Amino acid sequence: MIRRVDWLVMFTFARLEILQRYAGRKRRRSSLLPQATPKSAVLQTELPAQEIAHHVRVDGLADGLRLSEDAVADVKSFAASAPCYGNVERQLPLDRSSSGCLMPGDAVVGDYLDGIADCETIRHMWVDPIILEIAGACLGTRPLPLRSRLWWSFRADQATATTRSVYAQDCFHFDLDNWRAVKFFFYMTDVGPENGPHIYVRKSHRNRSVLDQLSPFKSRSDRHIIAKYGRDNLVVMQGPAGTGFVEDPFGFHTGTSVTGTARLILEIEYGVAQTPLAGPYYVPTIE
């Protein structure tokens, strides 16, 4: 009950920018991660970690992260054999064809849930020094793991707009998973216009109207987003397998519906407080 109250307080008040901006910063400065960036075994970046974090703080989004081919291959190998569950429901395990391909049926997404703990590369990424330094620089304190997901987005022509919005497709929204949070995304398959690319609304993580902050609803219409932030600030994230980016999830974003081959994506999220998340997602352990 205490944990539920803790989540409710966060969910109610974290949408207020003045509270969100200072949440978690009362920790001792010694809790911050060191400034020197050690090398990563699986990840390369185009910019230093501190510059990436600066872009996230200013724009809400930064790209230029790249997983190694071996890391991508290991995650895809895991995904090819591990149990996967339709629409994030453990009672809906997806079957595989004789060739090993998942058979989504009516499922919009397929999630590996806590099975990702069996993937060595994903376990390494939770504690990757570059990822942790970027997260720490974004949050201003030592990052705490909130959740990690590996999931497919399938072509689901039969799905209604309402169903797609449930699975964060074609519906601009923001996340309230913690007082402040940062998310990393990595494409494990090639993603172009037909593969459900992620869209982020640049600079939408700050300077919201009072009415926007007080609204109990997390989603906004396309018309509202374009009128408020401009079409030029809609950033469509595309790229080959291994492409990575990091964002402030308080900014508006959405996945898009798949019209071609399915998309496999990995998400890793960190926050500033150990507030429990809703949903059957895996919470990594960082010692």
Image: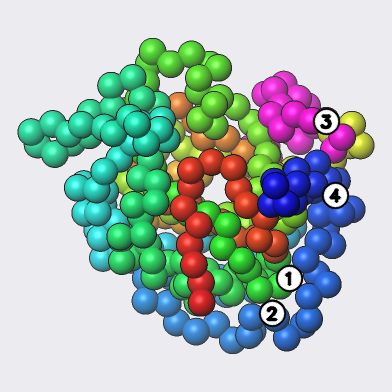
Provide the residue designation for mark 4: 17
**In the image, what residue occupies the spot 28% across and 27% down?**
104
Q: Are marks 4 and 2 in contact (CB under 8 Å)?
A: no
Q: Which mark is residue 140?
A: 1
| Residue 55 at least partly seen | no
Closer to the camera in the image, 70 or 216: 216
**Residue 151 in picture, x, y percent from top left:** 39, 42
**In the image, what residue occupies the spot 17% across and 34% down?**
96
Q: Are marks 1 and 2 in contact (CB under 8 Å)?
A: yes
| Residue 189 at least partly seen | yes
Q: Secondary structure at mark 1?
A: loop
Q: Which mark is residue 215?
A: 3
Q: Which mark is residue 103?
A: none
Q: Nearer the N terminus, badge 1 or badge 4?
A: 4
Range covered by the magenta-colored residues = 213-234
Q: Are marks 1 and 4 in contact (CB under 8 Å)?
A: no
**Residue 134 in picture, x, y percent from top left:** 60, 69
Name of the residue lying farthest toward the left: 98
Q: In the image, is residue 21 above or below residue 93? A: below
Closer to the camera in the image, 252 or 97: 97
Distance of mark 3 from mark 4, alpha carbons? 13 Å
Amino acid found under the numbered disc labelled 3: Ser
